Image: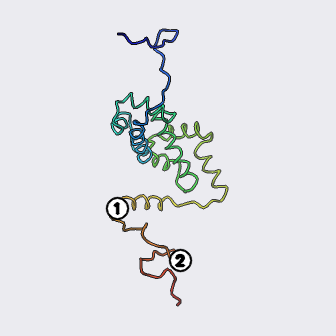
Amino acid sequence: MSQPARPRHVDGSAAALPPTAVGSHLLPHLRRARDLIDSGYTERLDLDRLSAVAGLSKYHFLRCFTAAYGQTPAQYLTHRRIERAQDLLRATNLTVTEVCDLVGYSSLGSFSSRFTELVGVGPRAYQDRYAATGAPMIPGCFLFMIGLQDREPDRAEGVGPDRQRIGAGGQHVADGDSAIPEKP
């Protein structure tokens, strides 16, 4: 019994099959790969690694991911990086080059052209637009410090900044201490 012939273009090359609905049994696998992109967008993520995380063959993963999310894994990764770059450019005083590095690009030219293509303006013009509104900027050194705190081993055990309260004047207050400052 032979399989039906694949549709062909006029030039004789095989046409792409229309996207089909992805079975619900595959969605958890695809979500694992999407979660890796969301959390590891600064890393070099390739199709081999993403498909391995999903537990699917490379090309089956590519077809299923595209059908489920409407874009290829590479497109999803690019959009995630550019979204994060927009956040950093809006809210920090980091340079465009620093933002480029932080979101996983190794080439400032590639980052700038992709940013312009997706956002409609270049990264510097985008940053200037928000600087003109007078929105408070977060110093880049603070962001780097917060990033380091996320990697401290004691945070996993429930001890750290997320378990502290902030008292008057911005000081951290340990549990059991009063958040109300003493009068001099």
Q: Quadrant of the N terminus?
A: top left
Other-residue count near label 2 (Cα within 10 Å), few / some / many at <14 / 14–19 / ≥20: few
Which quadrant would residue 162 be assigned to in this image? bottom left
Colour scheme: rainbow
168, above or below 104, in the image = below
Q: Which residue is drawn at 36% across and 35% down?
A: 51
Describe residue 112's horizontal placement relative to residue 3 as left or right: right
| Residue 107: percent from left, percent from top | 46, 40
Q: In this view, does 97 lie to the left or right of 176?
A: right
* Residue 123 point in image, percent of width and height: 58, 45
Q: Nearer the viewer, residue 26 or 169?
A: 26
Tag 2 and tag 1, C-beta contact below 8 Å: no
**SS type, badge 2:** helix
Helix, strand or loop at label 1? It is helix
Q: Nearer the viewer, mark 2 or mark 1?
A: 1
Task: Give the amino acid at mark 1.
Answer: Ala
**Dot 2 amino acid type:** Gly
Q: Measuring 45% from the left and 32% from the top, which residue is drawn there?
A: 22
Q: Give residue 61's mark.
A: none
Q: Give the residue number, with chain letter if any, for mark 1.
A: 156
Say if 77 sits above or below 132 in the image.
above
Among the 4 quarters of the image, the one containing residue 148: bottom left
The residue under the point 44% across, 28% down is 63
| Inter-mark Cα distance, 2 to 1 | 28 Å
Q: Where is residue 18 in the image (x, y as percent from the top left)?
A: 50, 22
Which residue is farthest right?
A: 133
Report how many numbered discs are placed on residues in the image.
2
Q: Which residue is drawn at 53% across and 77% down?
A: 169
In the rendered structure, which disc, 2 or 1, sits on the residue that comes first in sequence?
A: 1
In the rendering, at what x and y percent does residue 80 appear?
50, 43
Disc 2: which residue? 169
For label 1, count other residues whose C-alpha is less than 10 Å away and answer few (under 14), some (14-19) or many (20+): few
